Structure formats: structure tokens, C-alpha cells
Image (cartoon, helix red, strand yellow):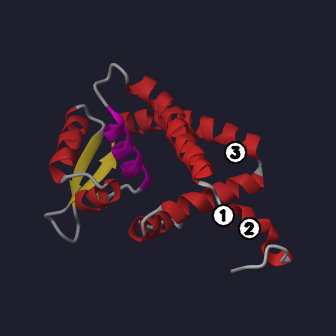
Amino acid sequence: MAEKNSSTNAGNESLLFLTDEQLRKGIEAMFFAYRGFTADPDRILEGMDYGRAHHRALHFIHRTPGNTVGNLLAILGVTKQSLNRVLRTLFDDGLVEARTGKTDRRERLLYLTEKGRALERALSDAQRARMRAAYRAAGPQAVQGFRTVLEAMMDPEMRRRFTGMAEGGQ
């Protein structure tokens, strides 16, 4: 066990020995933050017969144009049936289009249409504004710490996908 008076561990010790109540408050903060984070897009989607699954699909199709349905399934972690239902409405409403793969003609590569890009931009602009305000209020060290915590909470496969996307890959 680390010595409590060690100057190396003194700054980190309070982070390593959180009480259950401190952890509960962190969990509750995540729930309430998520509500705030999704509230703006929910208001935009209200009345359009779209939900958060549509929003997530639009977001990741935008982030990785030309991605396959299989990769989108893995990123979203939903069933094929659920994703097909979401994609069908996005296709029917002219927000997403599927193109045939150049190397594998069986692949359906997903792209946003102009209409889809406009909706995705409205949804993302609302979330970016909220994130920007929160980041400014918290300061640069908190921003880096927050990202570190979020990445540490990800399952290894999701962290790998996230890192790949952040680096410009799929």
C-alpha cells in the first residue's frame, strides 16, 4: 500500500480512494449530464418521428462517410433489425443513401444526403454549443481529465474504435 505522505502519491490519492457516495454522485452527474446533452437534439427531433437512434446513426454516418452497415452495427451496438428500421426511415426520408461498394458489390456504403447533412449539422451544432460552454467553464485541465475518464470507462474494443475515429480512421 502507498504511503499517505508520499509526495508522488499525495495528489492522486484522493482520486484513488473514492467513497461509494462520491462514486454515486459521479454516476448521477453522468445521468443528468446525459439528459442535458441529449435534450437539445431531442427538441430538434421532436415531431419528426426520429429518436436518439436516428441521431446516433446520422452522427456516425457523417463522421465516417462510406462506412458499411456492418461497421455501423458494431459502433452503435444495436441489433441488425433495429438498425435496419432506423436506416429504412432515413432512406425513405431522403437523409441517407447507400452506394454499392467498389471492391465488394454486396457492400452498402452509407452517406448522408444534403438534407441529412443539414439535419446532422443542426443536431451537432446544438451539442457542440453545450460542450463548448461546459469545457470553457471547466477549464483545460478538467477537459483533459474528463476525456481521460470517459476513455477509461470504454470497453477496450470501443476505445480502439474511438481512437481510430479520433485519428481520422474508421
**Residue sitting nearer the eye, 85 or 109:** 85
**Residue sitting nearer the eye, 47 or 95:** 47
Q: Image height check: is 6 above or below 115?
A: below
Q: Quadrant of residue 127?
A: top right
| SS category of the residue bearing label 1 | loop
- Residue at 28% from the left image edge and 52% from the top image edge: 110
User: Magenta stretch containing residue 62, yes or no?
Assistant: yes
| 2 and 1 marks in contact (CB < 8 Å) | yes
| SS category of the residue bearing label 2 | helix
Q: Image height check: is 133 above or below 104?
A: above
User: What percent of the width, then of the height, locates residue 50?
Assistant: 30, 30
- Residue at 36% from the left image edge and 50% from the top image edge: 61
Q: Quadrant of residue 129?
A: top right
Q: How far apart are marks 2 and 3 (CA)?
A: 25 Å
- Which residue is label 1 attached to? 17
Magenta residues?
A: 51-63
Question: In this rendering, would 49 be left or right of 156?
Answer: left
User: Magenta stretch containing residue 65, yes or no?
Assistant: no
Q: Which of marks 2 and 3 is in front?
A: 2
Q: How far apart are marks 2 and 1 (CA)?
A: 6 Å
Numbered label attached to residue 13: 2
Question: In this rendering, would 136 be left or right of 97?
Answer: right
- Which residue is label 3 attached to? 135
Type of amino acid under label 2: Glu
- Residue at 47% from the left image edge and 34% from the top image edge: 38
N-term mark: 1 or 3: 1
Count the numbered circles shown. 3
User: What percent of the width, then of the height, locates residue 76?
Assistant: 33, 53
Type of amino acid under label 1: Phe
Q: How far apart are marks 1 and 3 (CA)?
A: 26 Å
Type of amino acid under label 3: Tyr
